[in-house]
Image (tube, rainbow, N blue to C red):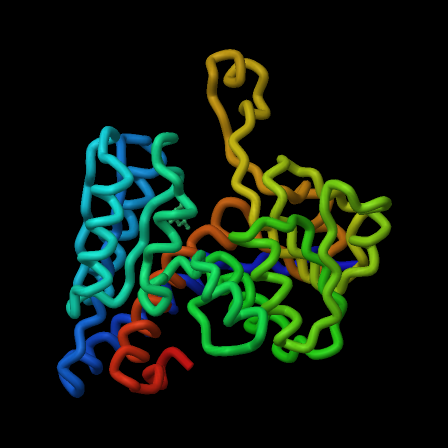
Amino acid sequence: MSEARIIDGKAFAADLRGRIGVAVHRLKTEKGLVPGLAVVIVGEDPASQLYVKNKGEQSRMAGLHSVTHTLPAETTQEQLLRLVNQLNHDPAIHGILVQLPLPKHIDSNAVLAAIDPDKDVDGFHIVNAGRLAVGLPALVPCTPLGCLMLLKDVIGELRGLHAVVVGRSNIVGKPMAQLLLQADCTVTVAHSRTVDIAETCRDADILIAAVGRPEMVRGDWIKEGAVVIDVGINRVPSADPEKAAQGKTRVVGDVAFEEAKAVAGAITPVPGGVGPMTIACLLLNTVTAACRSRGLPLPEELV
Ligand code: GUN
């Protein structure tokens, strides 16, 4: 038995961003279309600030028109809704992302519902969830879209494979299951109330872990040769007790990587697997939204 192939999401994402850059340049020169992304952040959560900074930088590097709206934590829901409405009507903006979490006094669902579904590059609007569920052209949440791209790159044809998705969140688990169904997989969604989750996972040709529990999926949950996609990003104390005592941490996934690597056919590492795909797919969704707004097909570099 050989060790699993390590799926290099960082390299795949860099290649995708490169292709997006080429496509954006052609859209600009040939069609006079500059895809525009507006990112809105409310408050000063450091993790959110870092995400938003990375989104802005990577958008600009790919040639997108990128605008960041930084609002104070005291912003009212009404003020935020007014900004969303303004962006909905701005012809230079094709994608709108409101960074989550929002401050407690703001109803996130009301804000997400106010975004024009055709500009909803997060794919969080219920109209996009519905479109995805019935197989209409949708904007698809970035993380599951990135997972699907990695799976197709590693496996090729997914038809007939048994995919087990562990986790049923609206952002990852549910849309992931829909995408795998659309790719003709047989799909099982496992979750905290599944009776024998290990046994369910052992039947998976494709195993997606998206639960947010550090190293929950063990090596003996995995069928030999299965392709394992680890969506988890969990911060835990350093493995070195001395460093842990100093408060040092490390990031692990939802899969016990070393155990899984000995059994799986291919596996995404954490970090460097799914994570880098998420922002690349946000740029891709912005280009998709811009092209659809003009009735243009997606540039050939991105098909
Ligand atoms: N917060 C953490 N990840 C995300 C994301 O993908 N989209 C939004 N809107 N907020 C987030």
Query: Can you give x and y, in whole percent of width and height, for residue 19 in the image?
Result: 33, 74
Query: Can you give x and y, in whole percent of width and height, for residue 275 in the image?
Result: 46, 51
Residue 202 vs 107, above or below: the answer is below
Residue 27 vs 16, above or below: the answer is below
Residue 39 vs 183, above or below: the answer is above
Q: Is residue 199 left or right of residue 65?
A: right
Instruction: Say which of 60 and 1 sits in front.
Output: 60
Which quadrant would the N terminus be assigned to in this image?
Answer: bottom right
Q: Residue at x 56, y 61 (%)?
A: 175
Query: Can you give x and y, in whole percent of width and height, for residue 62 in the image?
Result: 24, 65
Q: Is residue 164 left or right of residue 19?
A: right
Instruction: Say which of 272 and 36 sits in front.
Output: 36
Q: Quadrant of residue 164?
A: bottom right
Q: Residue at x 85, y 45 (%)?
A: 195
Q: Quadrant of residue 78?
A: top left
Q: Residue at x 69, y 50 (%)?
A: 166
Query: Can you give x and y, in whole percent of width and height, for residue 74 in the image?
Result: 23, 29
Residue 122 vs 20, above or below: the answer is above
Instruction: Say which of 170 and 20 sits in front.
Output: 170
Taking the view exactly as shown, the residue that stands out farthest to the front is 78
